[in-house]
Amino acid sequence: MKIICNVFAQNQCLNGIKKCVSPIKGDLGMSEAMTASRATQEYRTTSLAWAQAATRLAVIASFILAVLKLLAWLVTGSAAVLGSLADSGLDLFGSLVAAGAVRYAALPPDDNHRFGHHKAEALTALGQVALIAASAARVAWDSIQ
């Protein structure tokens, strides 16, 4: 039977404490706790595999769009296409950063990161949100002026 413990209980099990607490079932034996730990690890592995596939596709799509817009700009010389090319270039950059964060998040735990590197994705997303918010604020400011 697979039980997914909460993170606190899972960490207790991994640190060698013989008893884990599940918010649903109460005390768990060591074998159930290890099963829960394995289930949590399998979930993380599956999630990271999907995230890596999604970021790869995003990078490929962004690259193809940027190349097509570059070709269109070279043919037409249009300022509108150039602006769209700049937007696609920033999308490509954002996709590459996200792909790097997902790759870093997949690293196993080490001495400095006992519970893994999975928070890198959230921090990268926060950085992207800050960049988008700053861009929106700049556009709003320019439109008022």
Image: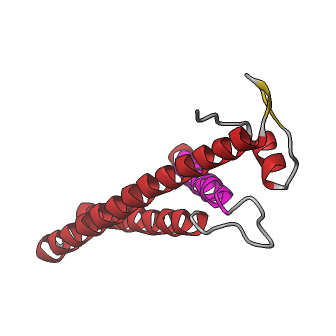
Q: Position of residue 14 (x, y in %)?
A: 78, 54
- Residue 132 falls inside the magenta stretch: yes
Residue 95: image quadrant is bottom left
Dominant secondary structure of the residues highlighted in magenta in the image: helix
Identify the residue at horizontal 50%, vertical 62% (top origin).
98
Q: How is the image coloured?
A: secondary structure
21 shown above or below 108: above
20 shown above or below 121: above
Where the N terminus falls, by quadrant? top right
Q: Nearer the viewer, residue 143 or 137?
A: 137
Q: Position of residue 44 (x, y in %)?
A: 56, 51
- Residue 25 falls inside the magenta stretch: no
Q: Where is residue 69 in the image (x, y as percent from the top left)?
A: 22, 67
129 shown above or below 99: above
Identify the residue at horizontal 29%, vertical 66% (top origin).
60
Q: Where is residue 41 in the image (x, y as percent from the top left)?
A: 60, 51
Q: Which residue lies furthest to the bottom in this view?
A: 74
Q: Give the residues drawn in magenta, as a range.
A: 117-140
Q: Nearer the viewer, residue 134 or 41?
A: 41
Q: Which of 39 and 143 is in front in this view?
A: 39
Identify the residue at horizontal 28%, vertical 61% (top origin).
61
Direction from residue 135 to residue 58 in the image, left or right: left
Q: Which of 61 and 4 is in front in this view?
A: 4
Q: Residue furthest left?
A: 75
Question: Could you tell me how many numbered marks the image carries?
Answer: 0
Direction from residue 74 to residue 134 in the image, left or right: right
Residue 127: image quadrant is bottom right
